[in-house]
Amino acid sequence: MQFGVSVMMPELHAAIDSARRTDTSRIPAEMARGESNRPAASVLDLGSNSVKLSHYTMDAHNDFKLYHQRSVRLRLFEGLKGGVMQPEYVDRTVETLRLFREAIDFEGIRHVVAVATSAIRDAKNRRDIVDRIRQETGLDFKILSDRDEALYSYTGAVRMLHIPSVLFFDIGGGSLEVVTAKSYKVRGAHSFPLGSLRLTQKFAEDPKYEDVDFEAMKKYIGKALPSLKDLEVKDGELYSAGDYGGAGGDNGGGGGSDDDDGDDRSGNDVRDGAGRPAVAMVGVGGVLRSLTKYVQDAKGYPLSKTHNYQLSMTDLEDIWKKIRDMPPDKIAKIPTINSSRADTLRASVLVIMSFLKSVKCERLTVSAHGLREGALALSIQHPAAFKSQRIDEQHIRETVLSAVSPSSALVSSKIDALVELLLSANLLHPVDRPVIRYALEQTDRLRSFRDISNILYTIMDDDSHLSHGDQLVAALALMHLRKRRKADINLLNFGSIARPYDKKRIRRMSAIVLAYQILEKSSADMAPEFGKGGSVTLAVHAPSGSRFPHLMFQEACSQLEGAFGIPFRPDLRVVG
């Protein structure tokens, strides 16, 4: 499929602008503020295989970051006998949740989101279970319908990937959830009984799951999986997210500039040759994170980072050949595989491979964000609807869009005009815009490090909608401000995800960031324009009485000139 340059549709652009004008008072008042004076929240996810507790810090924009997670394997699906959850499994669940309740109280967190999925949903005595949990722990679990589970998980993933049109799936122990969306509008949400634990139990021929009839399992999966028509996706419309730079590329960068060999593409709203929104395959789930770590380790990937990584069908087929006949106890010894997934890993790989084949897709984007993050975001954005479990597609779209920046927006108007001028002259590429924005958002971190090398690892530890390569470019642009040679050396160290023209991109973005820092700190504005001979005049409007750093700004102009190969001339004007 061929893709051309696209710009975000005006109506989608307007919807994003509206959604991002979120009143920060939406952050629930009961959120405790810890030592960092930042709101915090906890999410509990009671699934078929395990129960997870996650702690998050929050900021004023409703963005949150995981700072602690703990998981206990309960295997509740095994406790369903005749549709009834057996007492010993309920006892073990309550005991674990009492411990988690204590951990939440110890952190001083009062905003708690608790959701239960497939195993509890399937239990005939589900009401009795959640009532007992509430009585003994004070935790009020919401039993999610299969549709809600799918939508919450979609919300968590897409709000961090910024991909408008997706075929999304979440594979768990009890079920496979699938969502289709176009331009951030949900078109369908489905649930299929294809969870890895459920399938392993169904087709295992011994209690240790060593002998599993995978041929029968494969046939069963094939019959249960939906077709593209069922999912409202047209044949040929689905593409691999690696076909553009906005969501991972081939785990490398996504942009270029005037004379590079980069692709002609921009933004995350990619369209096919007929102008239709192309649909990306996106997946979440603990098993996908484990598989990603396995592939990265085998390939010597330079980052320990699963979010926004591209897994290919070839990757999955290679894994399948190695583990198909491997007993669970040997799988558990693979360093990158979570031992708790050893007995269900093969079923998971078979489901994912079968799904990709059924929809004719060769690659998927892995998100490290899913159900828990989606539930937390919805509880903040739409607290009343969340509490009453009346979340609908409009709530989902608004919550996703509130985290998405318009493709043309920058973090500060002080530098917008310069970037647009350079774009108009093809000295920057449109996909450089969000990378510059991301770099500018990180500038405050520069004050936190004596050794600038540390900023690279701090920034790369963050999950972002940028590809790994573009996130690396943003981090190295900041490093370049202080240690140019060190930035060049680090670029070489990450050669497998960097592109040939990234050195030029880093130098150009670093020069732009330097100019931005001077304007921001001096409360000055700038109006750039092309002059004679292709030079750029930077008319700086500094407030009267200010001590504008003339020499520093002259140095910034020199760096811009060296990076872009054209003269930049400062023109200081005092106003007010």
Image: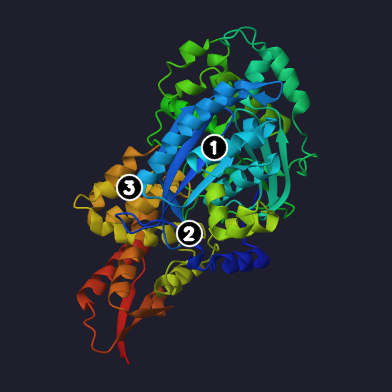
Q: Is residue 388 left or right of residue 300?
A: right
Q: Is residue 264 left or right of residue 443?
A: right
Q: CA distance from mark 3 to mark 1?
A: 39 Å
Q: Quadrant of residue 169?
A: top right
Q: Secondary structure at mark 3?
A: helix
Q: Which amino acid lies under the numbered mark 3 shown in the image of this protein?
A: Thr
For the question of whether residue 246 can be seen, the reply is no
Mark 3 surroundings within 10 Å by alpha-carbon count, few (fewer than 14), some (14 through 19), many (20 or more): few
Single out the mark in the foreground, 2 or 1. 1
Q: Earlier in the sequence, mark 3 or mark 1?
A: 1
Check the image and report above or below for 520 versus 318. Answer: below
Quadrant where the image shows the C terminus: bottom left
Check the image and report above or below for 35 versus 526. Answer: above
Q: Which amino acid lies under the numbered mark 2 shown in the image of this protein?
A: Asn
Q: Which residue is mark 2?
A: 62
Decide which of 461, 542 is in the foreground and name it.
Answer: 461
Q: Which amino acid lies under the numbered mark 1 shown in the image of this protein?
A: Ile
For the question of whether residue 445 can be seen, the reply is yes
Q: CA distance from mark 2 to mark 3?
A: 21 Å
Whole-percent x, y for residue 143 in the image: 63, 41
Q: Which residue is mark 3?
A: 458
Decide which of 501, 213 is in the foreground and name it.
Answer: 213
Q: Say if mark 2 contacts mark 1, CB within 8 Å.
A: no
Q: Earlier in the sequence, mark 2 or mark 1?
A: 2
Whole-percent x, y for residue 488 in the image: 29, 47
Q: Which residue is mark 1?
A: 133
Q: CA distance from mark 2 to mark 1?
A: 29 Å
Whole-percent x, y for residue 73 in the image: 49, 26
Check the image and report above or below for 563 versus 150. Answer: below
